[in-house]
Image (cartoon, grey):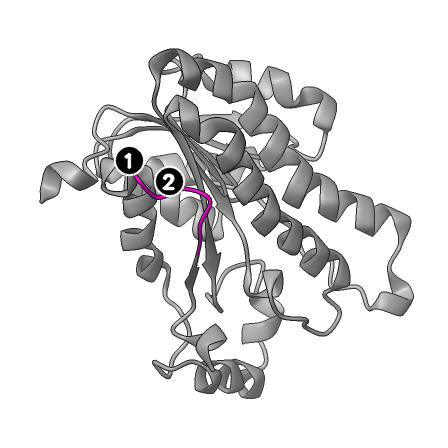
Amino acid sequence: MSPLFDVSGKTVCVTGASSGLGRQAATLLAAAGARVVGIARRETALNAWRENAEGETASLVADLSDRGALADVAREAARPFGPVDILINAAGINTREHADAVTDDGWDLTLDLNLGAPFFLSQAMVPAMKERGWGRIINFASLQSRRAFASGISYGASKGAVEQMTRAMAEAWSGHGITTNALAPGFFRTELTGPVFDDPVLAQRNADQTCIGRNGEPADLDGPLLFFCSDASAYVTGQILFVDGGFTAK
């Protein structure tokens, strides 16, 4: 079975690699033999990731909310190891503004980073994938792609759009051997979900909402991620996989 999930020798680009689930993804794929380029805003955190990661890694400091810079980011990401085979769009932001208090700046930043960056970075990397007839794009959706949470209107709007964008990207590019799918994590302890886990009562309430009875650990995402990155998912595209312990099943 192992050749089905083999990613060794593949060039992978992971956005948001400095922390959270992006860092987990970058670490996993480097240990699995892929050549991983991690992208994030914080150079110190990226360097810390590289120091602790196994395998071949490189880093690129970039502000992915700057749409005009994304074509350059795509070119720079291909410098260390060559054209990107697998793109994991894990970078994201949640401003947690109530609908009555949403600001222009907060809305624009959320949509630019959570929705614009995954699309335009993918668009810039797709031509090289088309030339090789093989590619994998993995977006990050959310529970809020389907559920409304308090103070989550801009984040939820962006993640709902990511779900539909994933299907549209699959329709556009799968005929060239490029599959596009999305992971939708439940509650995992990361910097982004810090405010949730800072409240033990809320964290336990979320755990109780799952079928499994606990919140997620970063390693719970490893298997689904390897599936989407490898030939094991060759006939799977345009799909959103909720890795949420059954939260959305109840």
The answer to which image quadrant residue 178 occupies is top left
Does any portion of residue 52 appear in the rendered image? no
Query: Which residue is nearer to you in this view: 236 or 80?
Result: 236
Query: Which residue is nearer to you in this view: 126 or 214?
Result: 126
Circle 1 Cα neighbour tier, 10 Å, few/some/many (<14 / 14–19 / ≥20): many
* Relative side of 120 to 233, left or right: right
Q: Is residue 79 above or below residue 220?
A: above
Q: What amino acid is found at the position of numbered circle 1 in the picture?
A: Ala
Total label count? 2
Q: Residue 30 carries which label?
A: 1
Q: What amino acid is found at the position of numbered circle 2 in the picture?
A: Ala
Query: Residue at horizontal 50%, vertical 60%?
Result: 190
Q: Are discs 1 and 2 less than 8 Å apart at CB?
A: yes
Query: Residue at horizontal 44%, vertical 50%?
Result: 239
Position of residue 45 measured from the top left corner of the image (x, y, whole percent): 50, 41
Q: Which residue lies under the disc numbered 2? A: 26
Circle 2 Cα neighbour tier, 10 Å, few/some/many (<14 / 14–19 / ≥20): many
Dot 1: element: helix
Q: What stretch is highlighted in magenta?
A: 235-240
